[in-house]
Amino acid sequence: MTTITPRPDEIVTTYLTAFFGGDIATARGLVHDDFRFVAPLDSGGIDEFFAGAERKAALIRNLRIQRLWSDADEVATVYELEIETATGSASLQVFEWDRVRDGRVVATTMLFDTADRAVELMRDALTAAAS
């Protein structure tokens, strides 16, 4: 029996949809054990990335993938997140560059405007939840 491995763009789309849809177990299963990430407000490994993931995902009302490019095992995605907290709502544009190895995401680089209202709302909500 032949096993068909999903293409890197399919893996990344499934991963993003799961993570921002709150299915953290599925998202984590699509991430390689030696996963590394870099983002404007944080960086680290798999444990740092998934710390508080459920709380973060609970603030996302919608993920809209606007454009996705794939070149071999690298996938670039531009997407919009609709964020809603107790104090307001806003949208955030994100560029994400993912590298896939052995059918799982091994590295992520995210770019977004840290001064965006959506980032402020998320930061405030996560700080309040941690207190």
Image: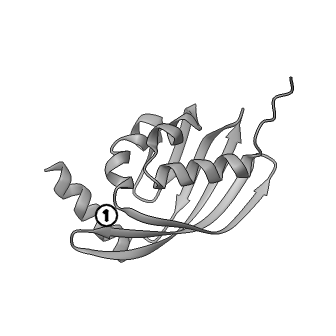
- Could you say where residue 24 lies in the image, as x and y percent from the top left? 45, 42
Picture mark count: 1
Query: Which amino acid is tagged 1?
Result: Met
Image position of 104 (left or right of 72): left
Say if 33 sits above or below 117 in the image.
Answer: above
Answer above or below: position of 92 versus 107. Answer: below
Q: At 61% from the left edge and 49% from the top edge, which residue is drawn?
A: 14
Q: Quadrant of the N terminus?
A: top right
Provide residue 128's location: percent of width, then percent of height: 17, 57
Residue extending farthest to the right is 2
| Residue sitting at x 67%, y 46% | 11
* Nearer-the-camera pick, 103 or 76: 103
Q: Which residue lies furthest to the top in this view?
A: 1
Instruction: Please indicate whether residue 51 sits to the left or right of residue 102 in the image.
Output: left
Q: Position of residue 12 (x, y in %)?
A: 64, 50
Rendering coords of residue 36 (x, y %): 54, 40
Give the labeled residue for mark 1.
Answer: 122
